[in-house]
Amino acid sequence: MKAVRCKDWGPIDQLVIEDLPELVPGAGEVVVDVNAAGVNFPDVLTVQGKYQVRPALPFTPGNEFAGTVRAVGAGVSGYAPGQRVIGFTRTGAFAEQALAPSESLMPMPPGMDFDTAAAITLTYGTSHHAVVDRAALQPGETMLVLGAAGGVGLAAIEIGKALGARVIAAASSDEKLAICREHGADAVINYEKEDLREALKAATDGRGPDVIYDPVGGKYSEPALRSIAWRGRHLVVGFAAGEIPKLPWNLMLLKGASVVGVFWGDFVRKEPAANLAAMRQMLGWMAEGKLKPLVSARYKLEDTARALNDMAARKVTGKVVICP
């Protein structure tokens, strides 16, 4: 079977395609024929050696996929060859076959296509964990979403609306903000053209947002935090801008605010039952039409490096997938 391989940390273009032996499941494991694999910003950081967790070299990047069960290992119940599943794994998704523990899989809902199924695990899982679990966003509250046209950003907008909140989307172009409007944003800010603090004052009648969803970092984190409402919660989701901000702690004191870390990967591993409950809630919202994942582009396996470079250059809206 063909797989993308990372043999050393560094430029994305060093990735290669190799023929590897077909995967064999061990006890409690399942091998899946991959129909689609979601691309995420942590994949970029992992290949570059900049992510919180470094896999042993060489490895196959990619950690979310959808496909058909090929084989099951000893002790696996509830899954059988031919079954359509959604999966999450630390590495290995950018390949024709993926291996995952059975507890990292869930059946695909009837009628869902593989591209959509591959696009929901990490982005919607991260945003649900952030918005529902870590921020406890309430109906009637206001949430600001930075980098709102990306995969996690659009997911955060939709989840915020499903909870009954008002959502302000901030992004770097009018084209991206139009997409945010389509996914439910109540107000939009182009932070390349507008002063973020002044725009937030106008959009919130001077009160500021109750929750800030921040997957960007860099130069926008501090002005957003300075605008936060009393008892606000600033969610640290990631650093797509490349720079980890150094925030003045006195801002949290003056606003009675909290800066809250969001690490969905460890949440999945340490609280699997809570993550499964979150996924079930979101699948219910999808059935009701409240969540509508946007898959904006599809790449062949041999174009994986291009997909990751597009992600690194912030050319991606919504989600993109690899189709082996």
Image (cartoon, grey):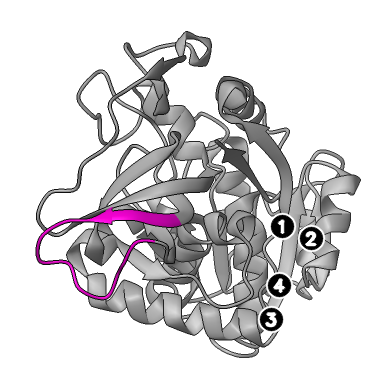
Q: Which amino acid type is shown beneath numbered disc 3?
A: Lys
Instruction: Report the residue marked by disc 3.
Output: 290
Local secondary structure at mark 3:
loop
- Residue 289 pos. (x, y %): 71, 82
| Crowd rating for badge 1 (residues with CA inside 10 Å; few <14, some 14–19, many 20+) | many
Q: In the structure shown, which secondary structural element does the residue marked by tag 1 occupy?
A: loop
- Tag 3 or tag 4, which sits nearer the N-term? 4
Considering only order in the chain, which callout, 4 or 2, is on the residue closer to the N terminus?
4
Image disc number at residue 167: 4
* Residue 75 part of the magenta-drawn span: yes
Q: Is residue 34 above or below residue 27?
A: above
Mark 4 residue type: Val
At label 3, counting other C-alpha atoms closer than 10 Å, the crowd grade (few under 14, some 14-19, many 20 or more) is some
- What residue is at 66 percent from the left and 72 percent from the top? 158
Q: What number is the disc on residue 294?
A: 1
In the image, residue 312 lies at what x, y percent? 59, 28
